[in-house]
Amino acid sequence: LIIRSLANFAGQEVFIIGSKKWHKGATNGLEKILPIHYFQSINEFLRYMRKTEYTLVAIEQSEKSVPLETFIHPERPCFIIGNEHFGILDNVLLNVSHVLEISSKGLHPCLNAGCAAAIVFYDFATKRVI
């Protein structure tokens, strides 16, 4: 879901941290079109990102987060989506430029990672000036 949503909203690259094992069948072949970069650790990923023009943006509920509806996206964001069970680690949040959250109106303020990513990608695509 995340890779398909990224491609649908004009994403250009995918960065995966940890295992190279993931469900490629759900991407409908997009893994052959979008460049996918693998990193063994978050530290390796962060070192790589410091050499790029990307601005790191975490999607996470935290004391530091701002609501998505008022967030002004950077020119080249790299959205960091946390683990389904434990989110984004504190040491990662210390290394990002922005933390945003999706305001919840329901009973439980929790979305799965794929759904949250799709909402943020859509927001980025609709707010940016082309």
Image (cartoon, rainbow, N blue to C red):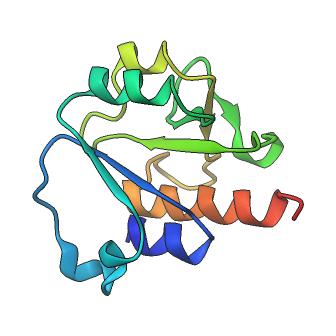
Q: Quadrant of the N terminus?
A: bottom left
Query: Does 52 sit above or below residue 63?
Result: below
Q: Position of residue 35 (x, y in %)?
A: 39, 62
Q: Please tell me in which quadrant of the rendered image residue 28 appears.
A: bottom left
Q: Tell me what residue is drawn at x 60 percent, y 39 percent.
A: 101
Q: Residue at x 82, y 42 (%)?
A: 70
Where is residue 119 shown, x and y percent of the image? 59, 62
Q: Where residue 88 sits in the image (x, y, percent)?
A: 37, 30
Q: Position of residue 59 (x, y in %)?
A: 52, 40
Residue 28 relative to residue 33: left or right: left
At 46% across and 48% down in the image, what residue appears?
Answer: 108
* Residue 36 visible within the image: yes
The image quarter containing residue 10 is bottom right
For image coordinates 89% across by 60% down, the residue present is 129
Residue most extreme to the bottom: 28
- Left-right relation of 80 to 66: left
How many marks do you count on the picture?
Answer: 0
